[in-house]
Image: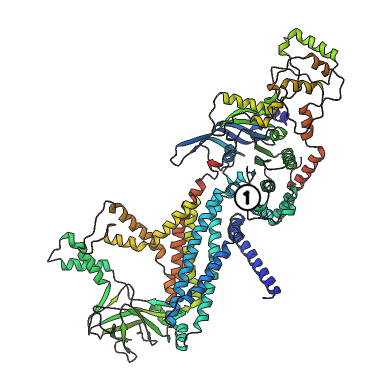
Amino acid sequence: MEPLSIVRLLIRVGTAFGVFALLARTLFGPRIASIIGLTWKAALRFRLFWVIAVLLIGSVILLPIVIKDDGTARGFTQILLTYTLSVVTALLGLCTLWLSCGTLARDIEENQMQIVAVKPVARWQIWLGKWLGLVTLNAVLLAVAGACIFSLLLWRGQKLPANQQRILREEVLVARGSLKEAKPDIDAEVERIFRERTKDAPVNPANAEVVKKQLREALKVDVVRPGYARRWKIDLGLRKNFLRDQPLFLRLKLYAASTNELGTYALRIEAGPQDSPERRAIDRTFADNAFHEIRIPPNLWDAAGVLTIDVQNRDRVALAFPIEDGFEVLYREAGFALNFARGLFIILCWLALLAAIGLAAASFLSFPVATFVSASLMLVALSSGTLASAVEAGTIMGVNEESGEAGKSVLDYVLIPMFKGMLKVFQLVQGFSPIDALSTGRSIEWTTIGVAFAQIVLLLGGLVALFGIVMFTRRELAAASTQA
Amino acid sequence: MAATLSEERRDPASARSDIVVAVRGLSKVFKDFWGRPKARAVDGVDFEVRQGEVFGLLGPNGSGKSTTIKMLLGLLHPTRGVIEVFGRSPRDVKTKARIGYLPEESYLYRYLDSRETLDFFGNLFALSKEERQRRSEQLLEMVGLTGARTRAVGEYSKGMQRRIGLAQALINDPDLVILDEPTAGLDPIGCREVKDLITALARRGKTVILSSHLLSDVEDVCDRVVIYYGGKIQAQGTLKELLATPDAVRITTPTLPRETMEKVLEIIRRDVSEDKVRIDTPTQNLESYFLDVVEKARARAAETSGVISGAKVAAYLKGEGEAKPATEKILERFTAPMPVVPGETRVASTESKPALDEEKLASLAKPAEPPTPAKSAEAAKDAPKPADLKKADQKLSSLLGKRSE
């Protein structure tokens, strides 16, 4: 790069900073804007920003080289996006917790906060300024990492075989919407069947829960016996007007009641209205316990916009289609770049919540304790599967696999309701899976973005921020040990 | 200043309107994690500070003066009592907009340079960019850091950090300036400049609260002081009130001929017995008074959360073996006026009660050069020269620029 270009670049960066500073001043006022600027300066002067940026870029570039994909467009994309985005999220998440605890707790412990707090700036403005500083810092780092991932994806995609490049372009690097049948109310269905079957032969109340649990498991899949067919009716609604002449994709997963030698199972799939000449049939074998995608010709829905799909089991074993993972129809909704940006936005919402948690902990705890508490909270959130198992078993003592009996503990009366509450809170955060959606080419809809922002940032982040601000406002900023 | 205050005291309404800081029944108890009382740092303190006053908080380490200041700034919450600054809570944002604070140590951001530091704090006062730049330039010039404006504050020496700390305390043209140990870490010239600045601020109607254990700082600039010990106020008032000895009379004259002295003493001996007459130079000063107050408080075994000094300096440091008796020294001083040596230790009058000595009296009666008692000589040395004051005032005028004197 020529010296003149470097000067131009520096001028542009400088101008950009000036523009950001002006924007922050206009949006939040001079006080909050100056705290945001201070957080940025601290990150840049302590070289934290650069270290994190190098770590992110390094991991984004190195990881796909180390991990091999299967050579298909889908495999390549899935591996690259899943691993790089997961590593970026984990790295930024940990850095955010550490930075957020440090930026407030250390200011308090090293007494700089004493000089800031005696100026005409409310404590909530200091707190909010720090939080906005961290969020904008994360946004920039995430954008840099995202740009690297995106460029890498396009660059390495060029090395795929021609047919895989077409799939990559048409089916993978797209934002596809998903349509499913309306989800049945499983709990209501369980109750109905239980009542019906126990009407004449009452079940011991002690065993009622076990029976209901078995019924619930059975209802989580659609079982298709050999020679039988299951019909799915997918209502396209108003989308039919936008999807004309566009191919659709059927995504399915199946389990076999018993495995055969090949591990694949024959299905006949017919799509289109029952007696229509347009109706198409596909005969294929499918491996069990894996996702499959089948291209469906365009315009096979009926006048009402309902796409009928019949799946006939042509194998000798019963096949089960899980309801949760879905038998779904995918359609192209938008380009990948915008979808990728939306996915990154959800990750940013998570990071914003982590920043709020770190700041809230630092509002009343010392730096090491705040870091420990926030990291522990994140660890608990990540092990929500264990909590869910305990809630499902109804005890923290586990279930005896041989006898099937669940242990009991007095603590269950306290912990199980607490776990339930925690899971509900975690669900508000974890109910979004941008990495999974991006790696499978699924569209992250604007409504999803809105809900994620409302749930993660406004609701949970707001509650955490409220707690943090109250604690920070009540806190005495001059420790007894510093008194003369 | 004292005269003005006396006049105000006669008019309570006027006095009330001029009260900048009001502290009533203020107590602070530090507690441990379990909420158990750990130390009573401030105990039932009452005082008021009026507009334009330079008010000193004096006390040994741990006496409660910094805790009081931090409660005045809203950094600590009082356990009991009321604090009003400009008639409002010290935590009110409007109150804080009128305060400038210099903490006892540099608590500035180490990664910012001095210009960025002032710009950051100027932003917190919502000053315009032009105003921030103008004030920053003038403040940096005033504290002598123009040449080091682009160096990170973390690289500064302690004295330089003190100077930039002082500059940030003045960025908002505060009506109330709270200075905690303002001369700590400064060289003598820096100390003088800070004192000049305080004087200039007071002349411009600013109120200054000064906390220090350096008695000369307080004596030079303060109108009124409170003396803390064990978290309680042991004494308060104007320096004149505190330092006066009401049951004694001092006549200060130029050196008199022996005959005149004998006549004067003869007349005095008619009413007062000889052992009650003392002749010395007027060396009563704040330091001796302060030590006296602390000594009395210690004698009453007042509880304190701070340091309790053994009140004795190690013998090898004092060089006691070579010392002349105190009485000898005093007589030497007042009978043979000598040029004042900078840094010379002044002997407190309360520590020595010399009896009359004929020989010394003879020397006292010598026709002599103009007397230069320690106090007046040092006062002359320390007093701000008109030119210095003018310079400081000019700097302040150009910086603050709003009020006329």
B176 relative to A397, above or below: above
Quarter of the picture containing the N terminus of chain B is top right
Q: Residue at x 44, y 59 (%)?
A: A459
Quarter assignment of residue A452: bottom left
Q: Position of residue A44 (x, y in %)?
A: 60, 61
Quarter assignment of residue B90: top right
Could one spot residue A189 in this view of the protein?
Answer: no
B177 relative to B280, above or below: below
Residue at image mark 1: B108
Is A134 on the left-hand or right-hand side of B336? left
Is A380 on the left-hand or right-hand side of A471? left
Color theme of the render: rainbow
A11 relative to A371, above or below: below
Who is closer to the viewer here, B391 or B129? B391
What is the total number of numbered labels drawn onto the structure image? 1
Q: Position of residue A305 (x, y in %)?
A: 36, 82
Quarter of the picture containing the C terminus of chain B is top right
Q: Amino acid at mark 1?
A: Leu
Q: Position of residue B344 (x, y in %)?
A: 75, 31
Where disc 1 sits, the SS reads loop
Quarter assignment of residue B273: top right
Q: Position of residue B124 (x, y in %)?
A: 62, 52
Q: Residue at x 76, y 14 (%)?
A: B356
Instruction: Judge the density around disc 1: few (<14), some (14-19), many (≥20) Cα neighbours within 10 Å.
Output: many
The chain letter under disc 1 is B
